[in-house]
Image (cartoon, rainbow, N blue to C red):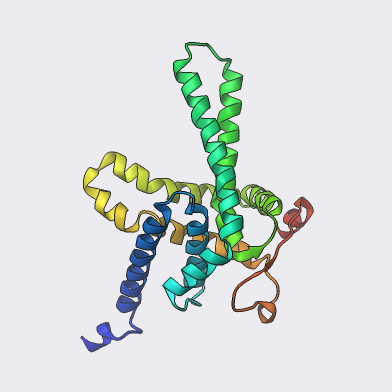
Amino acid sequence: MGRFLDMDSPLMRVLNRVGDLLILNILMIICCIPVITIGAAYTGMHYVLLKMVRDREGYLVRGFFKSFVQNFKQATLIWILMLLVIAVYVGDILIFNYSGMEFPKAVVVAVLAVAIILLMMAVYVFPLQSRFENTIRNTLRNALILAFANLPKTLLMMVLYALPLVICYFSTYAMLFVFLFGISAPAYGAAWLYSGIFKKLEPEPEEITDDMSFSLQLNEENEEADG
């Protein structure tokens, strides 16, 4: 019995990880309430999750707010851009559904295709922001390149992020579980997927600093070579 309760036992490691995800989910909910801070909150979460996946985590709350503060300005600007895009697409949906006009199928398909591409980019934006120092333009550009260069993983990450919404849609009883883990758990799964992608782009281990912060510049030729 004592072996099961040992801090290094598989059971205790799983329980500790569940507890960490619960705390991180609560932090996310609190920090997302002002809405404008959502970008910085997601950046802080991914900073912590990547360290968890790589077994390099330290103080969870301290690490979260360290990244939150350091990336606040740029992450918030990215989030505002995303909000503007969301507003445009909400407007498009309202126009398509309630304007009474018949739109060509090609237009509807094009709008949907662009929306999917933007969602593919979105799964990488805040992980990149948390891991690499870069301009907003290059962060968005790199997110687009990584989304297409790692398409199977990108699609799987999109499924993970959508899963809590699907669960809530089909079962109201699962809403408590989603409330407790619905943000951090899918992001933790995504971190397992993008951790390997990021490792290929990082400098040699001895060059990596404790704050896990360095620049990244991608181009299509490099991505094809990595592939």
The answer to whether residue 13 is left or right of residue 43 is left
Q: Residue furthest right?
A: 221
Q: Position of residue 123 (x, y in %)?
A: 54, 51
Q: Residue furthest bottom?
A: 2
Residue 72 versus residue 160 in the image, above or below: below
Q: Residue at x 72, y 55 (%)?
A: 223
The answer to whether residue 66 is left or right of residue 163 is right
Quarter where residue 21 is shown: bottom left
The quadrant in which the N terminus is found is: bottom left
Q: Nearer the viewer, residue 86 or 112?
A: 86
Q: Residue at x 49, y 57 (%)?
A: 42
Residue 26 versus residue 220 in the image, above or below: below
Quarter where residue 82 is shown: top right
Count the numbered circles shown.
0
Q: Nearer the viewer, residue 73 or 153?
A: 73
The answer to whether residue 113 is left or right of residue 218 is left
The answer to whether residue 142 is left or right of residue 119 is right
Q: Residue at x 56, y 45 (%)?
A: 80
Q: Position of residue 54 (x, y in %)?
A: 51, 73
Residue 193 versus residue 220 in the image, above or below: below
